[in-house]
């Protein structure tokens, strides 16, 4: 998946995708318990919450994957998530910590292909988990450096593409 726009993003309108439940929520044709609404961003409660107050922040424009979301829209999504994380902590709901979680791609656990950022209230014993062997492998520095070089190369190539596609 490159950084190029998918066909629906080339539409002059919002890029609403048929059969996308989040686009239906944005359009007002599907119900949601809305917390925040502006021109670009919508936030509403997850209907299958990990903990009470678990909410989703979405760009109103349909973007299936993170790479389909332009940076100018991604920034306000994160800004709203930061503000709502503060609101969750102040709300009186049980909240001893917060996880921000974004699943990009099926292998990452994405289920609704309209990019969304989870804001999840956390507390001891809440049952939330991401299974991984955290910290069980510590590669040698040479291996870390080789991977970092590979990623720097990919990032530089991406930046060249990105600069040429910004502000059309
Ligand atoms: Zn959508």
Image (tube, grey):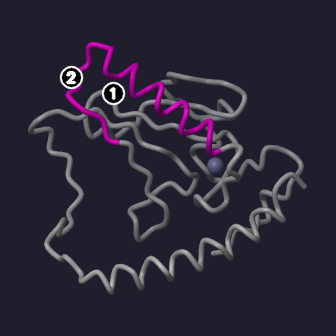
Q: CA distance from mark 2 to mark 1?
A: 9 Å
Relative to 96, does residue 151 appear above or below in the rendering? below
Q: Nearer the viewer, residue 98 or 57?
A: 98
Residue placed at 84% from the left, 59% from the top? 10
Q: Quadrant of the C terminus?
A: bottom right
Residue placed at 30% from the left, 35% from the top? 98
Magenta range is: 74-99
Mark 2 nearby-residue class (10 Å; few <14, some 14–19, many ≥20): some
Helix, strand or loop under label 2: loop
Residue placed at 84% from the left, 65% from the top? 164
First reached walking from the N terminus: tag 2 or tag 1: 1
> Dividing the picture into quarters, in which one does residue 135 lie?
bottom left
| Dominant SS type (magenta) | helix
Mark 1 nearby-residue class (10 Å; few <14, some 14–19, many ≥20): many
| Residue wearing tag 2 | 94
Tags 2 and 1 touching, CB below 8 Å:
no
Helix, strand or loop under label 1: loop
Drawn side of residue 18 relative to residue 107, left or right: right
**Residue, far left:** 125
Residue placed at 49% from the left, 61% from the top? 104
Query: Residue 68: where, in percent of width, then height?
Result: 67, 60
Query: Residue 112: where, in percent of width, then height?
Result: 50, 54
């Amino acid at each position: 998946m490159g950084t190029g726009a998918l066909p629906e993003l080339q539409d002059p309108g919002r890029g609403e995708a048929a059969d996308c439940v989040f686009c239906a929520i944005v359009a007002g044709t599907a119900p949601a318990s809305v917390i925040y609404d502006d021109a670009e961003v919508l936030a509403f409660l997850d209907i299958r919450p990990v903990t009470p107050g678990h909410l989703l922040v979405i760009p109103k424009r349909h973007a299936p994957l993170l790479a389909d979301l332009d940076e100018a829209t991604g920034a306000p999504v994160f800004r709203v998530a930061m503000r709502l994380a503060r609101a969750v902590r102040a709300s009186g709901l049980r909240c001893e910590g917060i996880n921000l979680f974004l699943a990009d791609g099926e292998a990452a656990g994405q289920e609704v292909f309209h990019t969304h950022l989870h804001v999840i209230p956390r507390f001891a014993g809440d049952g939330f988990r991401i299974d991984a062997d955290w910290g069980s492998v510590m590669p040698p520095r040479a291996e870390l450096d080789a991977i970092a070089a590979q990623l720097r190369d990919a990032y530089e190539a991406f930046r060249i593409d990105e600069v040429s596609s910004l502000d059309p």
